Amino acid sequence: MYSEAKEIYASIGVDVEQALTTLAHTPISLHCWQGDDVVGFEDGAGALGSGLAVTGNYPGKARSLDELRQDLEQVLSLLPGNHRLNLHAIYGDFGGKRVDRDAIEVQHFQSWIDWCKSQGIGMDFNPSCFSHTKADAGFTLSSPDTGIRDFWIEHCQRSRAIAAEAGKQLGSSAVTNVWIPDGMKDLPADRQSYRHRLAESLDAVFAEKLDPAHNIDAVESKLFGIGSESFVVGSHEFYMGYAQKNQTALCLDAGHFHPTESIADKISSVLMYVPELLLHVSRGVRWDSDHVVLFDDATQQIMQELVRCDALDRTHIGLDFFDASINRIAAWAIGTRAAQKSLLLALLEPHAALRTAEISGDYTTRLALLEQSKALPWSTIWSEFCRRHEVPGELDLLPQIKDYEKNVLAART
């Protein structure tokens, strides 16, 4: 079946083997926070704050570093290709001691770096500017309180240093992504002063120049959040301008825009002005609810745009959802594989024929080719990709997840 499918694609000018090679070398950064509902392992870690929420209480969530790593290893065994770990600062190996966020050091994350090395994967990092007493007022890097700002600046600076060391040890640049929840529930009287303070704080965070071979800085926007419905300091326009001016990477989160707004349309414009792009592939439903990624139009369009722009070498793809209403291993595996399948479908498009038709004004052929591509045997190519990487195919995925639930997750309750 694979040989026949490959011949069909070759007849329309698609090199399937090249597509599979590209897919294998395009990692997805797995967000650690899906495994424990964004709680982390700080001393006294508790409920989420800062407008974040996780719904559901499915049995078997990770309660320790060892359990989280065990779950991540299980997920990696279900995914074809090569991947990365995306770690938040609240997931440090603190040994049961209280280490405040402005005091974190490489030593608190060395065991994670060693774990990534043992798995043969890279690592990305995120300062955790939420769920903390110094974020309770709704402001961190843009706070009017100098002491609050300085605390979070120090936290972000230390996060960059940790990420750079991870990148150095692992031989793969770590993406350090800065997201803050700052905003107001009701209408502000002075938007600009908050944004001036945020820009000044970010300048301080990024003041030390780090080797891009070890660390890549990114900034992430948001439209609104719980408790910040009327005003978010770090809007898309703010960060687009900041990233362009300072030549940082820009993070586009699929759940951080209006539900009818596609981030796929933004990619070609953003890449004209910033050096690199970070994608948080998620699925917002009505609000930024971070549902599990699906093999749907929105995800396919994102991947299509990356391939059509020839931007995979300038793009870092990560996931950002947290669903506690279903098996968390399933959420990770299904969401990551959906992103990979969407990328595969994009790689299997007859790009040369599509461009030729479009540039000549033959929109009939363009439409026919796009629709034809949807009906071609891409799923056979996906099955071959899974087989080569010795991971379960579609029909074998759920039984393996259920077996892990029965033998591992069930014991945690």
Image: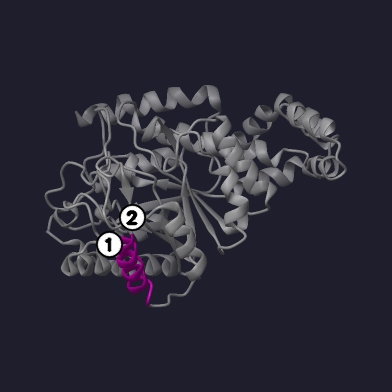
Q: Secondary structure at mark 1?
A: loop
Residue 203 to residue 302: above or below: below
Residue 255, by quadrant, is: top left
Residue 301: tell me if it is visible.
yes
| Image side of residue 165 versus residue 144, left or right | right
Residue 205: within the magenta?
A: yes
Query: Which residue carries the number 2 mark?
Result: 233
**For the residue marked with disc 2, what is the amino acid?**
Val
> Which stretch appears magenta?
192-207
Residue shown at 52%/35% (left/top)?
Answer: 337
- Chief secondary structure of the magenta portion: helix
- The quadrant in which the C terminus is found is top left
In the foreground, 411 or 365: 365
Query: Residue 160 has which mark?
Result: none
Whole-percent x and y of residue 119? 43, 52
Residue shown at 27%/51% (left/top)?
Answer: 188
Whole-percent x and y of residue 298? 55, 34
Query: Which residue carries the number 1 mark?
Result: 142
Tell me the distance, in whole angstroms, between the alpha carbons under discs 1 and 2. 8 Å
Q: Are marks 1 and 2 in contact (CB under 8 Å)?
A: yes
How many numbered markers are drawn? 2
